Amino acid sequence: MTALSEAESGGAEAQLRRPRIKPEHRAYRTVDGNVRIGSVIYGIGAEIADPDGWIWTLTELMDGTRSGPGIAAEVAALHPAAVKPETVGRAIEELRQAGFVEDAAAPLPPGLAERDPLRHARGVALLRWMDLSPRASPWQAQLRLRHARALVLGVGGTGGAAAQILTAAGVGRLHLVDPDTVELSNLNRQLIYGEADIGHPKADTAVAALRALNSDVTVTGERREIRGQDDLAALIAEGPPYDLLVLGADRPPEIRRWANRVCLAANLPWVEGGYRGPLVTAGVHVPGSGPCWECQRAGESERRDLRLAPGQDEAAASPRMPWNPASAVTATLSGTLVAHAAVALLTGVPPMRPGFRYGINLMSLGDPVLQRHPRRPDCPACGGAAS
């Protein structure tokens, strides 16, 4: 899903009818005469030395009103001693390859819903801001969402929030699976439900809520319990080919291990998340790309020094309770992190190297969570197979 196709990459620079610096990437000149482009956000912006001043002129002229050759000729005419048109043309292409340029004359790609251009205009602007790929149109990423199919297993705090966000984002098809009914104790954190839903199946209620949120998304659901790895494999095999599994369930405790094994066998990317007290995290997994969930778990277990006595169980340092202390803050944060990872895997924006866990510790906001461990040749799940 994340590889750029030839159509999305836009081909050669000559195909840019009216090159424009992306509005979110508008350049400015520094006090020492360099050109900064791509915003001041880490991971996006760049600074270009410009001793002769023609790069600044170039970025000013790339406003979407001129052709590429026209821009090149005009810059060369304004700076005849410094640059030639062909050099300017190469610079336009380099800026495009770096993700700072779009075609102001690019038409909307076919396949979008009629209301998408209005409904998703702000979301596409954000995708365009984070996208450093040379796409023909910023709407290509939205089109990927429109065509995507996701299976959401568990529609509680994390899964319910993730499903709401993916529906609002315009993921084309969502199938929701949950065995439970809505209880009063859910309502402090599972914002997809209300008091009138108490006693009703979560899957049915969530389907109705998401259809009301975005009728352009096809939402289906079923009340179903996953009791083992074979149950999960059967669920995935029964449906249409999914592009992604969104795991919001945290019970039974083995469910992530089951998901890892099943998704490896099905070659299905998956994301999962949850909350452990004030620690909120999400994991991003793609079979054949980076370590699998079990590689990550083993690596993290080795990294931590819990100073346990010989034979002492890990639960002594991290006790398990019948229910997980949580609020709407932790549940919605975890669902948001999961949804962000899902959108990134489905669109390629922003680019994400899978096989890691990220998140936030609400007790230490200046210390974000990022866990990434190497693939393990002795992993019982993926066996360290090469990408």
Image: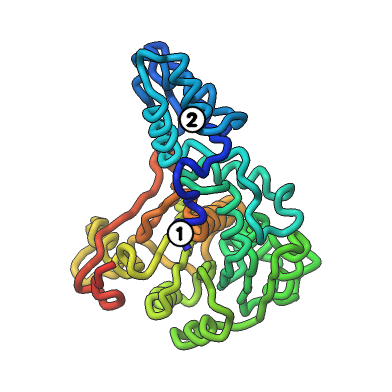
Q: Residue at x 75, y 57 (%)?
A: 114
Q: Residue at x 73, y 63 (%)?
A: 216
Is residue 194 at all visible to an observer of this figure?
no
Q: Which residue is mark 2?
A: 39
Horizontally, residue 261 falls left or right of residue 342, namely: left
Callout 2: few (<14), some (14-19), or many (20+) C-alpha neighbours within 10 Å?
Answer: some
**x and y, in percent, of residue 263 in the image:** 42, 75
Q: Amino acid at mark 1?
A: Thr
Q: Residue furthest right?
A: 196
- Relative to 4, is 136 above or below? above
**x and y, in percent, of residue 329 in the image:** 59, 50
Q: Nearer the viewer, mark 1 or mark 2?
A: 1
Mark 1 and mark 2: Cα distance apart in space: 24 Å
Horizontally, residue 158 falls left or right of residue 265, namely: right
Nearest the eye: 75 or 156: 75
- Relative to 366, is 230 above or below? below
Q: Residue at x 65, y 58 (%)?
A: 110
Nearest the eye: 283 or 158: 283
- Relative to 145, is 120 above or below? above
Local secondary structure at mark 2: loop
Q: Residue at x 67, y 76 (%)?
A: 221
Local secondary structure at mark 1: loop
Q: Which residue is mark 1?
A: 2
Is residue 363 at all visible to an observer of this figure?
yes
Horizontally, residue 56 falls left or right of residue 139, namely: left
Question: Quick one: label 1 or label 2, which is nearer the N terminus?
Answer: 1
**x and y, in percent, of residue 291 in the image:** 30, 64
Q: Name the quadrant containing residue 80.
A: top left
- Relative to 171, is 177 above or below? below
Q: Amino acid at mark 2?
A: Ser
Nearest the eye: 362 or 174: 174
